[in-house]
Amino acid sequence: MIVDKRFLVPLLGFMLLVAVLALGFKLRDPHLLPSQMLNRSLPAFSLPRLGDPSKTWSEKDLYGKVSLLNVWATWCPSCVQEHPQLMRISREEDISVFGINYNDDTAKALAWLQRYGNPFQLNIADHDGQLAIDLGVYGAPETFLVDAKGVIRYRHVGVVDEHVWADIFAPMIAELNRQAGGS
Amino acid sequence: MQIFRYLLVFVLMSGPAANAAIDAYVFPSKDLRVRYYDLIEQLRCPQCLNTNLAGSDAMIAQDLRREVHRMILEGQTDAEILQFMHHRYGDFVLYKPRFNSSTWVLWLAPGMVFCVALAGCIVMVRRRQGQRSVSLSDPDRQRLDQLLKDKA
């Protein structure tokens, strides 16, 4: 069969387009939204403490030291998976670990911490998702790296496992501590 | 064939149901309600890849619908509400993305492709016209004229 070569041009163009789009999906998971919060200060908030609604936490309670701010919930299966790593970090690493209990139920959340252990120095009860929206959170778990002045330096969507910790968080935290020590 | 009829009925009925967010938000006026539905139509659910706030039952979509309702009742303008969403969730949340350094390709590509195609068409048409005029040598042209004359 003789085919005019010119007819191959649109086909090649189409294949090129498919390749470019496929590469785009491969390089970047479309589920991961880039955070808008990077290098912004924590949003102001005043929310009840988990299990002690008569008292509140505010963004100022998170200042003073490099910290992880972890968005978690009892309805989130990945949070269970992530939990042992958070326990280890709070035990072994020189960093504060704060929790945002996101769209959850107080009784369930307290029972969950009882069962799996509590890695959080303080827990913010964000049961309407108000703070989560101000942080641009769209699921759980999400983990923010916040510097001593309350500026968000990194946001991780999904489970912080040992690789994420070793490859991403540990070097950034070392850098933040070095900057803080140097100045 | 009967089964296809049932399927057709099923498909026709499931469309509107799947698109209905079942919140019972109350608005003091019809205008505000219209604005609400307009906004949740054009805002994308951050959790979902291609569903707007109106069409999603994801937790974050429910929360954001509540925020849109609250801000409308507080008297905020559409621009302020879109800015609120963009500030937190970025370009992703707007189904009609803004024109900026990362979206200019998206906006300009159709026009550029059209211009390239138009230029290609013009070149092709010109080339064909050129071919026609040179393809007849003088003796051929005389023969053609003769033939046309004979025909008449």
Image (cartoon, coloured by chain):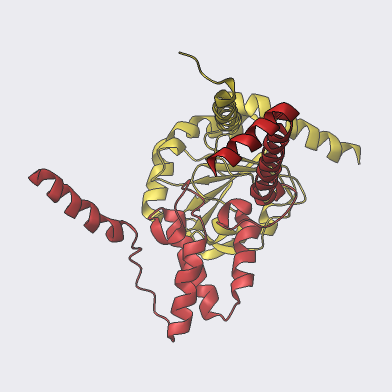
Q: Is residue A176 depicted above or below B13 in this figure?
A: above
Q: Judging from the image, what is the letter of the chain drawn in red?
A: B
Of A127 and A17, which appears nearest the observer?
A17
Give the quarter of the image for residue A113: top left
Q: Quadrant of the C terminus of chain A?
A: top right
Residue occupying the far left of the picture: B2
Closer-to-camera residue (B117/A54): B117
Task: Return the x and y of residue A132 as percentages of the image width and height.
Answer: 55, 55
The residue positioned 66% from the left and 52% from the top of the image is B107
Q: Kindly identify the residue that appears in the image at 22 percent across and 58 percent down.
A: B13
Left or right: A134 as drawn, with respect to A140: right
Q: Nearer the viewer, residue A180 or B8?
A: B8
Residue A53, x across and y down, in percent: 48, 64
Q: Residue furthest right?
A: A183
A86 left or right of A182 in image: left
The answer to whether residue B137 is visible is no
Chain A's colour is yellow
Q: In front here: B137 or A58?
A: B137
> Whole-percent x and y of residue A11?
54, 27
Q: Look at the picture and state if A88 lies above or below A157.
A: above
> Image quadrant for the N terminus of chain A?
top left
Is residue A81 in view from this perspective?
A: yes
